[in-house]
């Protein structure tokens, strides 16, 4: 047999549980800050024999449309597609050797990464994330 006092206790306990559940959701931790990847542009002037431009063109098969030099990415494991262009000084001018490759990376929250490249005078361009 359920008395009025038992009903009140049950209602009060249920109300406290709901407040704790809803209130706990309000105190959820803030989202992790994104990681940042900085693209690398060709050096202006300087007369280098070999130079490189490296930029992210897709993240997890989704194209990157922004023309910014810094790209924010959620922390975690990702596959980035990178366009790497070796610029080689030949005679009186330069020749560009474009290529694309993919890198599988593990990004940490709040960390800034810089794209760079290993380039050769033959026009090989291998992207490196530092």
Image: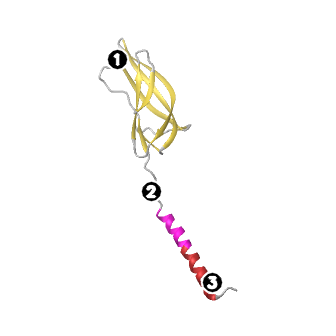
SS category of the residue bearing label 3: helix
Tag nearer the camera, 1 or 2:
2
Quarter of the figure that contains the N terminus: bottom right
Q: Residue 49 carries which label?
A: 1
Are the residues flagged by discs 1 and 2 in contact, CB closer than 8 Å?
no
Where residue 119 sits in the image (x, y, percent)? 41, 21
* Numbered mark located on residue 7 in the image: 3
Q: Could you tell me how far apart the alpha carbons at marks 3 and 1 are, in whole angstroms? A: 85 Å
**Which of the marked residues, 1 or 2, is nearer the chain's N terminus?**
2
Q: State the residue position of label 2.
A: 30
Q: Position of residue 91 (x, y in %)?
A: 36, 11
For this orientation, the residue located farthest to the right is 1
State the image coordinates of residue 35 (x, y, percent, origin top left). 43, 43
Name the outermost residue toward the bottom.
4
* CA distance separating discs 3 and 2: 39 Å
* Extreme-front residue of the structure: 1
Q: Which of 17 and 79 is in front in this view?
A: 17
Q: Nearer the N terminus, badge 3 or badge 2?
A: 3
* Depicted 9 relative to depicted 99: above or below: below
In the picture, which quadrant includes the C terminus? top left
Residue at horizontal 63%, vertical 84%? 7
Q: What element carries label 2?
A: loop
At label 3, counting other C-alpha atoms closer than 10 Å, the crowd grade (few under 14, some 14-19, many 20 or more) is few
Answer whether labels 3 and 1 touch (C-beta < 8 Å): no
Query: Mark 1 and mark 2: span between their CA atoms?
Result: 48 Å
Q: In this view, does 30 lie above or below 95?
A: below
- Are there few (<14), some (14-19), or many (20+) residues within 10 Å of tag 2? few
Residue at 45% over, 28% down = 127
Q: Is residue 66 above or below residue 84?
A: below
Magenta-colored span: 17-27
């Amino acid at each position: 047999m359920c008395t009025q006092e038992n009903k009140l206790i049950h209602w009060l306990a249920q109300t406290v549980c709901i407040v704790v559940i809803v209130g706990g959701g309000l105190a959820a931790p803030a989202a992790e800050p994104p990681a940042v990847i900085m693209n690398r542009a060709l050096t202006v002037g300087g007369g280098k024999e070999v130079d490189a431009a490296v930029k992210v063109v897709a993240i997890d098969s989704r194209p990157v449309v922004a023309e910014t030099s810094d790209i924010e990415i959620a922390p975690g494991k990702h596959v980035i597609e990178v366009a790497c262009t070796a610029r080689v000084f030949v005679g009186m001018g330069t020749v560009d050797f474009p290529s694309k490759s993919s890198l599988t990376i593990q990004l940490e929250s709040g960390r800034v990464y810089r794209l760079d490249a290993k380039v050769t005078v033959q026009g090989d361009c291998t992207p490196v994330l530092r």
